[in-house]
């Protein structure tokens, strides 16, 4: 069985294949080192809040697996359980409560006094907080390394090279440093992340996916602006950034930057990084909507937006006021990075058969790859090995594209769970 792609989704699929079928011959193929492309840029957060019960059930299963693995490994991947804080200045949040679908443990804090009592770092303007209790963060890299170790112990192998063609009978051409190698496989799994559409075309299949580049920063919080016990916090509200009149005039004069004076979407998020004794903080904001082709070098100046650190600091300072100090004087030590959200229009994954002759896919994991990888890999392995499939298996596969009613509902939904 050949798995094309050694990000967290491909690694998890290989791991669960070896769990489901003893002595399975599993080969991970990638031109890069494992977990070194999109998976290396993950925010590494998890939550079971989703605006559809199918996705809630799917991610709950994945969190169950993360819990199990944390117990079995003495928590080698540093799983935490602080939850998610969804913050808003709105006073009427009935629609947000209604949007919590499936088995979700959530607490509503209403009124500025209640919010500030529980989360004093948040702006005094926040009127309501929904605290999703089943959430937190992990080290995706450590999770991937653990699975790779288990895979090696079970006889799984890696091949570093680029798949350039897939012929009849799943004959893969792989361009390696030593030249072109031919790999014959009875099963091919497309786990190529942002390159999934390219690999699918080698099989004569067009995938309904797009790639959108989203950015994050991590910085040393030398001012102690963020409490170390603060959960992952999301500002749900659209907002105008706090520019001065002079800055607004300058933005208006620049066609490429004028959009920064317009209302920005919600979703600015923040969390401490490195545990109680750490000093680093992560900020993100998935406001980009532009579809682009994946590049080999994600730090390329044509991909990464030099304005992003200032933008995200301004956005985050709107709901965590202590961060305003970093708008005025940016931190000396910070890391600016990004990765591709490979996603369907409805923001659901594609997991299962690609056709009727042995090809499978585990992909379109958007911005939720780390949290969903366990359930995604286990589900793909169950499809391949003829295992018991969960109730949501069909709806997370390519088969849902033929369900006209479901697709119309999902595409029209105002909230697709994108954070």
Image (cartoon, helix red, strand yellow):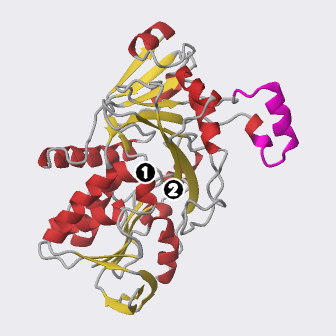
Pointer 1 residue: 42
Label 2: which secondary element: strand
Q: Residue at x 59, y 28 (%)?
A: 237
Q: Toward the viewer: 196 or 317? A: 317
Tell me what residue is drawn at x 67 percent, y 45 percent: 307
* Secondary structure at numbered mark 1: loop
Q: Is residue 293 left or right of residue 142?
A: right
Overall secondary structure of the magenta section: helix
Q: Which residues are magenta?
A: 242-259
Q: Position of residue 2 (x, y in %)?
A: 31, 79
Q: Earlier in the sequence, mark 2 or mark 1?
A: 1
Residue 417 lies, in percent from the top left, at: 48, 42
Reading the image, the residue beneath label 2 is 339
Q: Residue at x 52, y 79 (%)?
A: 201
Q: Are marks 2 and 1 in contact (CB under 8 Å)?
A: yes
246 or 100, which lies in front?
A: 246
Disc number at residue 360?
none
Q: Is residue 321 magenta?
A: no
């Amino acid at each position: 069985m050949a798995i094309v792609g050694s990000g967290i989704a491909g690694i998890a699929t290989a791991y669960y294949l070896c769990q489901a079928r003893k002595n399975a011959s599993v080969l991970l193929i990638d031109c890069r080192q494992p977990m070194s492309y999109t998976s290396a840029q993950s925010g590494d957060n998890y939550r079971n809040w989703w605006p559809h019960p199918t996705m809630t059930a799917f991610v709950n299963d994945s969190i169950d697996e993360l819990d199990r693995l944390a117990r079995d490994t003495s928590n080698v991947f540093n799983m935490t359980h602080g939850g998610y804080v969804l913050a808003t200045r709105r006073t009427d949040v009935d629609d947000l409560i209604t949007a919590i679908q499936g088995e979700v443990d959530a607490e509503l804090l209403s009124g500025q006094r209640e919010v500030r009592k529980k989360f004093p770092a948040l702006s005094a303007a926040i009127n309501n907080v929904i605290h999703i209790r089943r959430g937190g963060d992990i080290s995706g890299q450590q999770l991937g390394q653990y699975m790779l170790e288990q895979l090696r112990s079970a006889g799984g192998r890696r091949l570093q090279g680029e798949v350039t063609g897939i012929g009849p009978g799943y004959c893969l051409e792989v361009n390696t440093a030593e030249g072109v190698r031919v790999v014959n496989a009875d099963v091919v799994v497309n786990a190529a992340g942002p390159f999934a559409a390219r690999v699918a075309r080698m099989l004569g299949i067009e995938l309904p996916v797009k790639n959108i580049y989203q950015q994050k920063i991590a910085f040393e919080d030398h001012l102690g602006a963020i409490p170390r016990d603060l959960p992952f916090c999301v500002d749900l509200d659209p907002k105008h950034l706090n520019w001065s009149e002079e800055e607004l005039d300058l933005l208006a004069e620049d066609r490429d930057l004028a959009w920064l004076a317009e209302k920005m979407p919600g979703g600015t998020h923040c969390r401490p990084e490195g545990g109680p004794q750490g000093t680093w903080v992560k900020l993100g904001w998935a406001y980009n909507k532009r579809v682009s082709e994946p590049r080999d070098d994600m730090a390329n100046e044509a991909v990464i937006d030099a304005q992003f650190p200032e933008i995200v600091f301004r956005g985050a300072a709107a709901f965590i006021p202590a961060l305003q100090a970093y708008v005025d004087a940016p931190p000396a030590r910070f890391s600016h990075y990004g990765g591709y959200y490979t996603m369907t229009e409805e923001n659901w994954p594609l997991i299962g058969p690609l056709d009727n002759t042995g090809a499978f896919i585990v992909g379109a994991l958007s911005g939720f790859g780390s949290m969903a990888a366990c359930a995604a890999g286990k589900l793909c392995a169950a499809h391949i090995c003829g295992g018991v499939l969960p109730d949501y298996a069909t709806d997370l596969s390519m088969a849902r594209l033929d369900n006209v009613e479901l697709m119309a509902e999902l595409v029209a939904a105002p909230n697709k769970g994108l954070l």
